[in-house]
Amino acid sequence: MHDSLQENARVPAAPAATGAMPPLSTRARETELALLAQSPAFFLRENLKLRLVGVRLALLSRDAASYKANLKAACDWLSRNYDTRHNAVAQAVAALRHLHEAEVSLEAPDPDATLEALRKPRGDHERGAR
């Protein structure tokens, strides 16, 4: 039964559009790799994508703490599981660190100015153009 579970657990390869990722780091811990199926690179990419989706959702929901935490986790994930000597990985880590260190204003915009402008009567030149 265990063999049939392993045969059914095959995961399709990631689409070619995602591009080839550099080789996995040898620093990845044995226990983490033991939990991965036949294609650890697929799961590493998917976990990274989930972290980046978390960054996006935190930004959209104006949650600065989650934004920073997900950026740090994504950066740590890349550094721990991929070879940082590879140029693409080094650039991704640098970009994530730059985003993490940047101050981001997550305050909701104040709609009062827009509403006030809409309430003001139009000027005479705008009324005459109609």
Image (spheres, rainbow, N blue to C red):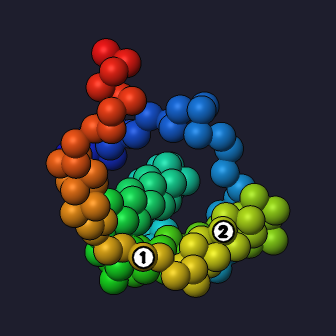
Q: Badge 2 is on which residue?
A: 95
Q: Depth check: 84 or 118 in front?
A: 118
Type of amino acid at the residue the image marks with label 2: Ala
Secondary structure under badge 2? Answer: helix
Q: Position of residue 42 (x, y in %)?
A: 49, 49
Q: Residues within 10 Å of mark 2 (few under 14, many from 20)?
A: some
| Residue 82, image quadrant | bottom right
Quadrant where the C terminus lies? Answer: top left
Q: Quadrant of residue 115?
A: bottom left
- Looking at the picture, tell me which residue is in the foreground, 60 or 123: 123
User: Residue at position x 37%, y 18% from top?
Assistant: 129
Q: Which residue is mark 1?
A: 105
Name which of mark 2 and mark 1 comes first in the sequence: 2
Foreground mark, 2 or 1, reads 1
Question: Which of the pair 58/10 is nearer the observer?
Answer: 58
Mark 2 touches mark 1? (CB < 8 Å): no
Which residue ends up furthest to the top in the rendered image? Answer: 130
Drawn side of residue 81 relative to residue 4, left or right: right
* Badge 1 amino acid: Ser
Image position of 120 (left or right of 76): left
Q: Secondary structure at mark 1?
A: loop
Q: Is residue 90 visible?
A: yes
Identified at 22% across, 48% down, the residue is 120
Residue 59 numbered mark, or none: none
Q: Position of residue 14 (x, y in %)?
A: 51, 38
In the rendered image, which quarter is residue 79 located in? bottom right
At x 66% / y 68%, what residue is drawn?
Answer: 95
Position in image of residue 109 (x %, y %): 30, 65
- Image coordinates for residue 36, horizontal then vertical, percent: 42, 60
- Using the image, determine if residue 19 lies above or below residue 63: above
Cα distance between the residues tagged 2 and 1 = 18 Å
> Can see residue 61?
no
